[in-house]
Image (spheres, grey):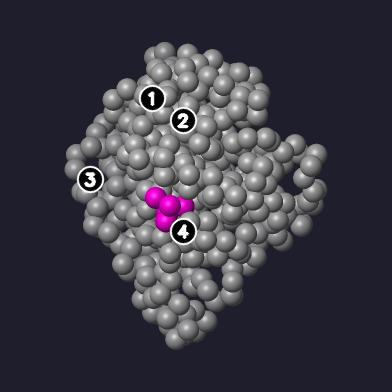
Amino acid sequence: MSSLEEPLGFDKLPSMSSIDRIQKFSSSACRSRADDVAMGNCWIEGRSCSTSNSCDEDYEEYTREGFPWRIHTRDYLSQGDSFNTRTLSLGRNNKVFRKSCDSWHLPDHQYNSKCNDKNITHKFLKGIPRFVKIVEVGPRDGLQNEKNIVSAAVKIELIHRLVSSGLPVVEATSFVSPKWVPQLADAKDVMDAVHNLEGARFPVLTPNLKGFEAAIAAGAKDIAVFASASESFSKSNINCSIEESLFRYRAVTRAAKELSIPVRGYVSCAIGCPVEGAIPPSKVAYVAKELYDMGCFEISLGDTIGVGTPGTVVPMLEAVMAVVPFEKLSVHFHDTYGQSLSNILVSLQAGIGTVDSSIAGLGGCPYAKGASGNVATEDVVYMLNGLGVETNVDLAKLLMAGDFICRHLGRPSGSKTAIALSRVTADASKI
């Protein structure tokens, strides 16, 4: 997630050495107590174990009240027969045939993926939902930091391709001042072209009532608001304090309620801030609850600068899930340190069934040097396929959508899955 209004230049940020940065975002930095998070069966299955430092009376009481894992295990829809053999075409005459939940073959290799109920109910994967909703943020969050303007026609075509792949939610654009985000100056044109497209919903960001009114006039049927758990980030990103931003959004959500428009809430800096360092989970929980109480149907928890690890994500989720129903939560990870997939996995183990991601790993945060893009949608789908989790997303079509936008941007995909499979097909073409 990134800017809504005036961006903060890198020169305005305090410099942080590598050692300082690692220390600020170490797994212990975001924990309120050393024993707040017990790793292993204790937190995965919600029952006590023999580990002396994690299963005492205080921890058991804390876990029951703040993070009842057992309650979070849900019986999702069965997988059915949706994982069919697909043809993956990444270039002329280059094809790979795969079956997502069986053995699949590539030249000189065979990859076995056992996607059955027995695997899903394994004790280490017990809480993972059988269906995960993916919220695609590429057309907005992914593209808005691009220096070269991407035409409305390309954005519209990208959205069509993403919907065609089966993605149920595609964040289309943002109604902010073009002065601050020139890449999204064509928001009205994009919405005019896609708002009646069937098969998906298209939320748009609206930072205030003015943006909300412009979005509704352009045909928006879903909107989103954006708050931060960091006071410094809020002031630099949207030019107001956390409380001032919440005041703005209460007005937006009231207006949306009158028109029966659903509102999604974002919480940025849910793990760390480029200025303040580690963010206490209690602050994230406060902002998330405020958004939920004002009527947001879903709250996306964003690691905006990508410093999170499972050790810092778990206590953050623990705090938020104590005050907001877990089924109302989504996670949004940036992949700066390559931790996104592991962070998503631990979130799934908590029972969270909605994940934000960006095609080809597009995006980034303009406020933190080195912060890379969002986790790639292709990589998330590949991992979920390997877990036997249904998404209704066709990976082959998704890869082609990523290839489409990367060709227009003139650079390779940020998706490791796309890169790996393109190499495989290139090698196969030489045989």
Q: Amino acid at mark 4?
A: Lys
Question: Is residue 104 visible in this depiction of the protein?
Answer: no
Residue 316 drawn at (x, y percent): 52, 61
Secondary structure of the residue carrying numbered label 4: helix
On the rendered structure, is 367 left or right of 317? right
Q: Which residue is mark 4?
A: 289
Q: Which residue is mark 2?
A: 213
Q: Quadrant of the C terminus?
A: top left
Q: Earlier in the sequence, mark 1 or mark 3?
A: 3
Q: CA–CA distance between discs 1 and 3?
A: 35 Å
Q: Does the magenta-highlighted stretch encompass residue 85? A: no
Residue 116 drawn at (x, y percent): 25, 51
User: 211 and 307: which one is in front?
Assistant: 211
**Against 95, is 376 above or below?**
below
Q: Which residue is mark 1?
A: 219
Q: Residue drawn at (50%, 23%), measured in percent from left and top?
A: 187
Q: Residue drawn at (53%, 38%), measured in percent from left and top?
A: 208
Q: Which residue is mark 3?
A: 79
